[in-house]
Amino acid sequence: MAIKSIRIDDRLIHGQVASSWLRYVGAEQILCISDRAAKNPVQEQVLKMAAPGYIVHVFGVDKFIRIYQKNPIKKSTFLITDSTSSLLKMKEGGVEINKVNFGGMRTREERTISYNYDLCFTPQEDEDLRKLVSLGVEINYQVAAYDSPVPILDHIKQVGGK
């Protein structure tokens, strides 16, 4: 599989991803899978400029699933998506997802479940996280590439969640 690493981070490409994760993963291209970003041409351009030297593509979730089903990914790829719900939809759409790095989902008005500043979920996103884990997807909380990965549900318990 050409997908070398999958990350959930609602900021998609930002300083830590550009300066640390991209070198750590060693991928040729970045796929940002986000309905919100795909609908915003300004955000799409900013994402493409945020990782100089890399090929960056931005797709909505449904479009990515269609492309993935018809065209195998050939380049080594770092896939970043913005939520557990997007990830579950990809998994259910046939995208091979076994191991995921959780970098953060931050506060938003609709995210009423907050375990920590970077562990905020809508009820649906929280349910989708737990469904992904129950499907056997290994999801580790790991903000920076040099941090030790911690299973996401263990990390939620460490910060006082259930």
Image (spheres, grey):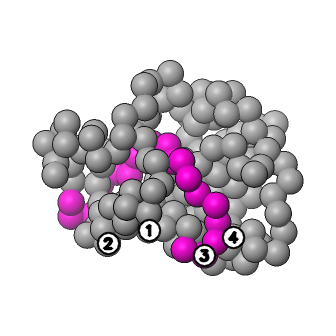
Residue matched to label 4:
64
Residue matched to label 2:
124
Q: Amino acid at mark 1?
A: Ser
Q: Amino acid at mark 2?
A: Gln
Task: Give the quadrant of residue 36.
Answer: bottom right
Real-space CA distance between mark 3 and mark 1, rounded to the nearest whole angstrom: 12 Å
Q: Amino acid at mark 4?
A: Phe
Q: Is residue 111 visible?
A: yes
Real-space CA distance between mark 1 and mark 2, rounded to the nearest whole angstrom: 7 Å
The secondary structure type at the circle numbered 4 is: helix
Task: Give the quadrant of residue 93.
Answer: bottom right
Start and end of the magenta stretch? 92-113
Residue matched to label 1:
85
Q: Are marks 1 and 2 in contact (CB under 8 Å)?
A: yes
- Identify the residue at image location x=77%, y=49%: 2
Please tell me the numbered disc located at residue 26.
Answer: none
Real-space CA distance between mark 4 and mark 3, rounded to the nearest whole angstrom: 10 Å
Say which label, 3 or 1, has the lower sequence index: 1
The secondary structure type at the circle numbered 3 is: loop
Residue matched to label 3:
93
Task: Give the quadrant of residue 134.
Answer: bottom left
Real-space CA distance between mark 3 and mark 2, rounded to the nearest whole angstrom: 18 Å
- Identify the residue at image location x=86%, y=53%: 74
